[in-house]
Image (cartoon, helix red, strand yellow):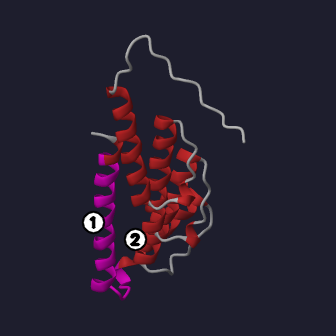
């Protein structure tokens, strides 16, 4: 599987998870006394991992959202050295940023470019990757006749 196919599959999974997480608050908005141990444990886990960030008074949905955003921002920081504030981005935005950085790194490595992930949306990066791949394939498939050297550029003076 190519890196692009992997990213498309990963994005499909992320979108599915986002819809599932979005449906969760609709079915369980009120906190019950039975979820207190789960909230306490999740808050403790977040605080152990990331420092004092949350209290167990938040809903289980809010705690999971914060944990997911912290995990995504931390993963991006470890993989790519880009520090993002989890409070400034939704989980979906962080996933998109991670995917854009991943694709930009692949483009820069594979085609000798110096693309900044901030300058392009994900679809634009996919288009650029496809263009560069097609360009690279066409250049590698068009053999140059032996003994021919490119002619030097003609300079016009006026």
Mark 2 vs mark 1, CA separation in Å: 24 Å
Q: Which mark is residue 38?
A: 2
Residue 4 shows up from this direction = yes
Identify the disc placed on residue 16. 1
N-terminal of the pair, mark 2 or mark 1, is 1
Q: Residue at x 53, y 36 (%)?
A: 112
Quadrant containing the N terminus in the rendered view: top left
Q: Residues within 10 Å of mark 1 (few under 14, many from 20)?
A: few
Judge whether 31 appears above or below 47 on screen: below
The residue lying at 34 percent from left, 47 percent from top is 4
Between 89 and 126, the residue placed more toward the observer is 126
Badge 2, how many Cα within 10 Å: few under 14, some, many 20+?
few
Q: Residue furthest right?
A: 158
Q: Is residue 109 above or below residue 59?
A: above
Does 20 appear in magenta?
yes
In the rendered view, would you say 145 is above or below 80? above
Q: Residue at x 38, y 31 (%)?
A: 139
Q: Looking at the picture, how far across and down is residue 127, in whole percent? A: 38, 53
Image position of 139 (left or right of 26): right
Image quadrant in which you'd find residue 21: bottom left
Q: Secondary structure at mark 1?
A: helix
* Residue 8, numbered circle: none
Q: Which residues are magenta?
A: 5-34
């Amino acid at each position: 599987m190519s890196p692009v196919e992997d990213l498309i599959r990963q994005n499909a999974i992320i979108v599915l998870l986002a819809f599932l997480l979005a449906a969760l608050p609709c079915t369980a908005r009120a906190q019950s006394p039975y979820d207190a141990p789960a909230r306490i444990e999740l808050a403790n886990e977040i605080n152990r991992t990331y420092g004092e960030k949350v209290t167990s008074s938040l809903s289980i949905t809010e705690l999971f959202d914060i944990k997911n955003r912290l995990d995504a921002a931390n993963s991006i920081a470890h993989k790519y050295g880009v520090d993002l504030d989890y409070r400034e981005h939704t989980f979906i935005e962080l996933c998109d940023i991670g995917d854009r950085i991943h694709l930009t790194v692949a483009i820069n490595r594979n085609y000798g470019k110096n693309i900044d992930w901030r300058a392009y949306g994900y679809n634009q990066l996919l288009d650029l990757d496809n263009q560069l791949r097609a360009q690279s394939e066409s250049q590698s498939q068009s053999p140059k006749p032996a003994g021919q050297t490119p002619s030097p550029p003609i300079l016009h003076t006026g």
